[in-house]
Structures are given as structure tokens and as C-alpha cells.
Amino acid sequence: MKDYTSPLQNIKIADLSWSVVGPDIALYLSYYGAEVVKLESLHTPEVTRRSSPFKNGVSTLDRSLVFPIHNTNKYSLSINLKHPKGRAIALRLVSWADIVIQSTTSKTLEKLKLTYADLREVNERLIVLVTSNQGQTGPYSSHPGYGDAVVALAGFPEVTGWPDRAPSLPPGAYSDSFTPWFGTLAVLAALEYRNRTGKGQFIDLAQLEVAANMLTPAFLAYSANDSQIIRRGNRSQTDAPHGVYRCIGDDRWCAIAITSEEEWRNFIKVLGEPDWARAHKFSSMAQRKRNEDELDKLIETWTSKHTAEEVMTKLQANQIKAGIVQNVSDLHRDPQLMHRGHFQTISHPEVDKYTIELPPYRLSKNHAELRRPAPLLGGNTEYVCCNLLKMSGEEFAQLYSEGVFE
Amino acid sequence: MTADNNIGTLGHLKVLDLTDEKGQSCGKFLADLGAIVIKVEPPEGDKTRHHGPYFHDKEDIENSLHWFSYNTNKKSITLDITESKGKQILKKLVGRVDFIVESYPPQYLDGLGVGYKQLKSINPRIIMTSITAFGQSGPYSHYVANDLVAWAMSGFMYTCGEVDRPPVRCSIEQAYVATGVQAATASLLALHYRNLTGKGQQVDIAMRECLPSGGFEIFFWETEGYIGERLGVKRRRGNIYVRDLWPCKDGYIGWRLMTGPLGATTAYLLVAWMDREGMAGELKDIKWETIDMNQLNKEQMERWESIIISFLKTHTKQEIYKEAFEKGMQMSPAHNTGELLRYQQLVERNFWVNVEYPYLDSHITHPGVFCVMSESPLVTPQRAPRLGEHNQEIYIGELGYTDRDLIQLKTQGTI
């Protein structure tokens, strides 16, 4: 039975962040009931509003397909922070909020007089999370860069790809994906701490330090054994077969991982007990590991006669770890993702419909809530000022005519 | 499990950790936030203790560096939850904790009589975080996966790697950490719900949904049916391919060449530097801020790239980073593991933690906490526990068993 109480139903967030990481933290919290106001400006629009692709190729600030997936459920309040009265309105938003998310380097925050110390003056129970590439302190804290920089700095290229080729990279700007997971966790923990103690706090979320936590065993191996883990394709350090094999069709592949003798016996049964599988050189994990090149070729002679779907289905029926290397088209037909309602469609006044992916968790008592599409730029300025910040209609009109909300 | 452990952000909360590799880092991150996390291992040890690499490459259940990585700050007890005495003890523990994190196949614990429904009757406030490869129900709920298969099925792998090779993953397992952190997040969402209602619940997490499904490809697929391709270190943006990793004299540099207002600053600074060394060529006359990326063609981009690469190859990554830092160019060196451990930024932030492992007569460097919190700092890593290291503390100190009981439980194979 789902409940009408949302875990974060009383929580208010001022999203003063930019690009992907900060906005996604606010987004993930909004799914479970937090009310989010995104602070924007007509003068310096959010970078994802300016990112292609645009609906039907028409590049306006409300037609990017990138912006909506990071800003669903939010209200947009437009304020010109360069206007002498702008900062005061921003601080009213801050005093309304429980949580402020920022994503600028310390220098920029100082320039805007919106540092934690400034914000705390108006709201001492505030939780402020600032995300940056390298943290708020340290010699390189002010070095600018997008997520690509963090992936390189953290050392992902060295451990991604083929040993006989130049380094590769995980798809997308990977640190933009994993940093918000940690930021969301940190905010939820800080809220619990505030529930107990009444105290807010400042959270310095450095993407590089999060990235290091995604690669932990590499540092332990280096420190304990003086050994540098480098990329080894799809192979495991200890197990074989462990790879991605070609199947029937254009660019169709299936991943297979055998990690015990029992699985190996089941595996060769599915293959129809071919003669080669009985050879001494494949008789143990260590032997298979030693003769892995040959083993992989033999396995591929089997997989290449089947579709990836057949390979996965046959192997999984025997409790063997196997999966199609799915592309975006496969994902939209994936029966398990459909069952879980992973993809959701939302109507939007400018981009028509867009698709959003839900987080990987389902709570037995709470839904992920999709309350409204991503906002148009400044689309909720009046609502936020008059209804949430309790500004009088007169005051709003006055400030509006002075250009504060541009 | 005592009140004097009430430190950290979540110091008042207790967690039973019954996970394998899929969910181990969930308990670790909750422990980093101060929760008391008890790893419940079968008497022969968690199977992840057989996951390499190993300390000094010696395979042993007390030597797994993978285990060390994701079990810092936890306590370890042994318990066979499949036999009746073991189940009784598990139920006693369940009455005293806030969370159970588990990663057994769907319905496995129900079959043992210790599933969510049964445990809820002991402790209605319990939050059970259940991690599986594909989810608790649905057509693939009985499917099995490890990191490799999660990469494949998530969509993250299809565009990773090179066009003439199979799709490829990162050699340091990503799916397990991605799952652990999001499982911890979901657990805390359930906690906030419990704060409001007093009710516990079950949380269902699918590992393969924890990895990203593949970045920008979803837009191109929706707008033009393009399913993406493996481009190595390049990305498709509009009609062109942009490069995110550039070779230099002794390694690689992370950077994306962009025109328009977003990329002009770095582009001008770089070209000015190239020009000082007589290597700017045709780039010298470009008005970067006026060029729309969408109007560029592939040949032009490739020509620019080759001019820039020729220049970068005359400098080391440290030389380039120094210049980038001083002038404000968005370029960063691609570190290897050793270089990141020595990187001044992280050293000065006191990020790394030298953790003592007395029984190995050694220290091992662990990454520090994943964020810096001003009022309730995260707990810096304390070494992962040895198998059953906290049996005495939990069974005698908490549950009131005697030394003699403990010996008996051990002989019976319960713990």
C-alpha cells in the first residue's frame, strides 16, 4: 500500500546550482516530496538551457531537451543578481529554504556575497551543499572545468578500455552521473542530523574526491602491492570466461561471466558439451585463465550462431550471468524496465513530450513523484514570490517594473 | 550498538549488513556517515573475501583488498542464518536495529522464514533495503549479474570503447559502488518517511539500473533514431565529434575544444601559447566566440585537432596543467593511480587516510570521506574487520550470551 505521506514533504530546496550535478541532487530529492525552486536569470541562462539538441532544432531557452531531464518538478524563479535589489530577493528565498544547493567555485560565491557565512546569517538551520570539481579549499580549488576534467584527474582513462590501445573513457560525462548520488546521500544524512540536533551545516562535495571513492581498490592495490591496475578490456583478474561476445546481427553482443566451476559445468551443458570444452587446458579456472584468448574464440564460435537475446535467455535459464549489451533502443523495449516503470513520459509546453528515467529504487510505501514538467525560464517567478515568499502583489509589481526579475 | 557510539551524522542508527559484493558499499557509506553497521557473515566468511586483488598478492580471506575497500568502519559477526538457531539470533538482532541491507535473490529470505514480512512482525519500524541484479519482481527478477553483466544490460557499455572492438567496461568495478551509494540514499528516504509516520518499509533496488544508461544518446535516439556508436575518447555533438582526451608528451590531457562563448576563453589562451612557440598555424586567426559548434564540419575539426595535438605533444602534462592553472584554461592532466595519490590538491585537503592493519603489520592508503561536512564530519576509514572480530562484543555485550554459549554456538556451526 502506497502512502500519501512523502518522505520529504516538508522540505524546501533553493537550487542555486548550475549544469548537471547540483540540479540532479535537487531533482532526486524532489521525487520524494521536496519542493524545489530553481534560481535563474534571464541574463545568464542555465547552460543546459543552451545545450543542443533542441526540439525540432529551434534553439530557444525553453526548447533544449537537456534541461528538462535535470529540472523536472522544479519552479523557476528569475532574478538578476547584478541588480542592486536582486541579492535581497535571493536571500528571501534562502530564508524560506531548508537546503541550498550551489555549484560554483568559492571565488564566484564570494563575489556574489552568497557564501555559506552569508546564507547562514539569514537562516542558521540551513543545510548548504556546494559541489565543485576539486573542493572549496586546496591549491587547485579554483581551477575551472566541466565533468570531463574530473574523469581525467581521477584516473578513469587509465583503467578504461583495452590494454593494447590508448586509454578510453566511460560514456557521457561520467562524474556528472555519480557525483549527484553522493550529494543526495549527504543531504539526506544532514537532514537527519538537523532533525536530532537542530543544526544545519555546510557540505563541501568535491567531485574528484567522490571519483576516488568510485575507484577505491585501485588505491589499495597501489598502496599495498605497489601495483598499478591498468585497463584489461572486459577481463576479470581471476575468472574466465569473462567477456563480451559477438552474436548474430549488426553490432550485437552478449556479456558472459563465469565465476565458479559449477557455472562452468552448466555453461558447457548449454553449449551442448562440445569436445573442446573437455580439454585439460580448460579444466579449471586457472587453466581457463591461462588459455583465455583461445577460450574466447571458441565461445564466440557458439555465440556468433545465435542472437544476443538467445544467448542471454539460454544462459540465464541455467543461472549463468549473461546479458545483452543493450543500446538505447533495446532499453526502451526491455520488459524488466517496463515492469518497473523505469521510463516515464512527461508533457511540456515547449518540447511537447520528454522521457525521464526514474532512480533505481522502488519504495514499498512511496512513489517517485512527477508533479510537473521542467519550468520555463522564469515561468514561476510571480508564484514563488507571492505564494512561497509571501511578497505582496504591490511589492512584486514594483520590483518587476525595476527589472529585478530579469 | 551502545550509546557511546553516538557520533557522526547517523550515530544513533544501526544497520545489519547481509550483502554480498552487490551491496557491500551501502553499509560502508552508512558507516562513513556514523551509523553502526554490523556485517553478518556466514561462519566460513563472506564470499567477497575471495575477491581479489589481495594484500601482497596472497589469496586469503583476511587479505582481500576488495573486501577492505568496501567494509571499512563496519563490525563483523559470523552467523549461519540458514539454520534454526541462527535464525533465532538474527531475529533478536532485528529487534535492535533500524535497517537491514541484504542482496539475496528475491524470496530467498522469505523461504528461510526471515523475509521482510516475517521480520516486520518483530520490528514494525525496520527498513529492509533489498538489493538484487534486476529487481524483486518482473520477468528478469530471477536473472543473475555481476559488474560486467550490469554494464551490458544498463546501456552504459554499448557506447564505451572503440568501433572495431566489442563494447568494454572500466576495469575497476563500478556497478557495485553505484548500487551501494544509491541503496544508502533509498534507505535514508525510507528513514525520513519513518520519522513522519513511524512505519518501516521495504526498499527494492536493481543494480543494473544503478549505472547510467548512456548519456546523451537518449536524445539522439528520441529525435532521430540514432543509437550511438563507440567513439573511444570522442563524443558526438551535432554533426561533429568532439575529443575529451588529448595525447601530450608523456600522457593525456582532459579537455574539450569548444567554440562559442563557453569555449572561447580556453581556446584563445591555448592558441596564444601555441603562437608564442610558433605552432599556432591557421588557428591564429580564428574568432572562437563567433563560431557555432553546430556549423562546424568534421574535416575542419580534425584539422584543428591535429594542429593542437602536434603542439601538446611537445609538452608534458604537468607543464600543460601549470599553464592551464595559471592562465585559467580548462585543461587537466589524466592521472594514473600513483599520480592521484601524490596530487597536491588532495594531499593538502588531507584526503587520503593511511589505515593501520596491525595483523598484516602494515598500513594501507584508503580514499578519504566522500564529502566534507562542517558540523558532523564523516568518520574517516577504520580498517575493515576480520572475520567474526566482533562476535564477543555483539553476542556477549549486546545480546547477553555467555562465553560458554559462544563456544557452543561455534561448535554447532551457528557462528
Image (cartoon, rainbow, N blue to C red):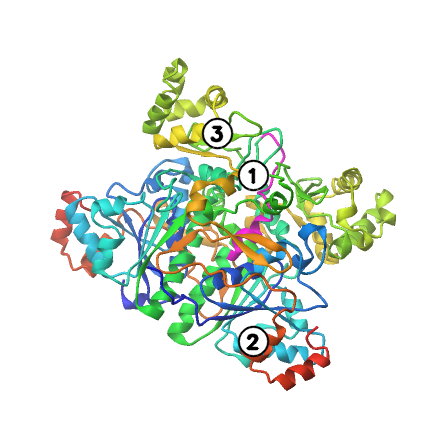
From the image, tell me which residue sits under label 3.
Answer: A308
Element type at mark 3: helix
First in residue order: circle 2 vs circle 3: 2
Q: Position of residue B277 (x, y in %)?
A: 84, 46
Q: Which mark is residue A147?
A: none
Q: Can residue B400 be spotted in the picture?
A: yes
Q: From the image, state whether disc 3 or disc 1 is nearer to you.
A: 3
Badge 3 and badge 1 both on one subunit = yes
Q: Which mark is residue A94?
A: 2
Q: Position of residue B352 (x, y in %)?
A: 50, 54
In the picture, the quarter occupied by the N terminus of chain A is bottom left
> What residue appears at the point 58 percent right and 80 percent down from the top-left corner?
A386
Q: Magenta region: which residues? A: A164-180
Q: Quadrant of residue A88?
A: bottom right
**Figure check: B184 above or below A279:** below
The chain that hosts pointer 2 is: A
